[in-house]
Image: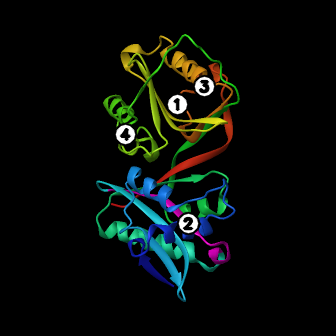
């Protein structure tokens, strides 16, 4: 087996390899060149540092690497089903860890679904430890509040607000201000009187996907976030609301419960490895 830089491949080729490597995954994943380009932009994925594992001229899998400062994140690692028992994943992970140490990175992070036992065993065997559990929430029909008028603003405004009030490492990589500062095309942001803000990663005819929710500290405890979500429900009636499995387990539990959200069946664990 050999390792190649992902920068040698067109985005369309990497998307095709991604889809093959994540076939039968815990949740359905489908990547196109456009959606991959958006992920590269908003997650700080560096294709020059990302790797493809090859055997006999055939691409077996890939590892997408993100980097901020001296910290790396394994944004995605997948191996074709027929090659998973041949050690390709372990071979690939060893190379990305070696690369990170050679460029003097201090820490590497990743998220993995809690139920994905083979992947967890691979990461734990390489020295990663669990930092925290990440959960999601769903609500089939949130209560609406038509009197709560919301204003739509630039989605990047959410990251600026979040950066003012969030401590470093308080959130997983995909919810950090730097990630939300480069919103994909589908992202939208709404505010209730500049007191509370909600970042929506996408709206379809059936569902609204909420990526972030924030109330400025001086306005907390006054019901602003509840009014905000009820105003959002009025804007998008008869749609289910979902929050991805990226929320630290101990964050905002009473808030979601009070609004009728139930915890999703799936959960992730955030893991980290000290490289120093």
Q: Point out the stretch of residues depicted in magenta.
A: 71-84
Residue that numbered label 3 is attached to: 256
What is the CA distance from the residue labelled 3 to the residue labelled 4?
22 Å
Counting residues from the start of the chain, the first of labels 3 and 2 encountered is 2
Can you give x and y, in whole percent of width and height, for residue 135 in the image? 60, 39
68 lies left or right of 204: left
To which quarter of the image does residue 161 belong? top left
To which quarter of the image does residue 156 belong? top left
Q: How crowded is mark 3: few (under 14 residues within 10 Å), some or many (20 or more)?
A: some
Numbered disc in front, either 2 or 1 = 2
What is the CA distance from the residue labelled 3 to the residue labelled 1?
10 Å
Question: Against 49, is 107 above or below?
Answer: above
Numbered disc in front, either 3 or 2 = 2
Disc on res. 18? 2
Q: How many marks?
A: 4
Numbered disc in front, either 2 or 4 = 2
Q: Residues within 10 Å of mark 1 (few under 14, many from 20)?
A: few
Counting residues from the start of the chain, the first of labels 1 and 4 encountered is 4
What is the CA distance from the residue labelled 2 to the residue labelled 1?
32 Å
Can you give x and y, in whole percent of width and height, for residue 166 in the image? 37, 32
């Amino acid at each position: 087996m050999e390792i190649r830089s992902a920068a040698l491949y067109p985005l369309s080729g990497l998307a095709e390899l991604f889809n093959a490597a994540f076939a039968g995954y815990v949740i359905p994943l489908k990547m196109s060149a456009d959606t991959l380009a958006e992920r590269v932009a908003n997650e700080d994925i560096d294709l020059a540092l990302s790797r493809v594992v090859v055997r006999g001229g055939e691409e077996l899998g890939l590892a997408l690497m993100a980097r901020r400062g001296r910290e790396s994140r394994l944004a995605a690692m997948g191996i074709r089903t027929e090659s998973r028992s041949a050690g390709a994943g372990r071979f690939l992970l060893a190379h990305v860890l070696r690369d990170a140490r050679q460029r003097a990175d201090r820490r590497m992070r990743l998220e993995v679904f809690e139920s994905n036992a083979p992947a967890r065993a691979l990461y734990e065997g390489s020295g990663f430890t669990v930092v925290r559990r990440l959960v999601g929430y769903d609500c089939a029909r949130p209560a609406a509040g038509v009197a709560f008028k919301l204003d739509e603003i630039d989605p990047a405004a959410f990251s600026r607000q979040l950066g003012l009030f969030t401590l470093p490492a308080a959130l997983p990589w995909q919810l950090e201000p730097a990630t939300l500062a480069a919103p994909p095309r589908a992202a939208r942001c709404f505010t209730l009187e500049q007191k509370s803000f909600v970042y929506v990663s996408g709206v379809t005819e059936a569902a609204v996907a909420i990526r972030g929710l924030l109330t400025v500290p001086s306005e907390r405890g006054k019901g602003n976030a509840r009014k905000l979500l009820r105003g959002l429900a009025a804007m998008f009636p008869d749609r289910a609301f979902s929050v991805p499995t990226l929320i630290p387990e101990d964050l905002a539990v009473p808030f979601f419960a009070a609004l009728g959200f139930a915890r999703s069946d799936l959960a992730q664990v955030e893991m980290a490895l000290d490289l120093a």
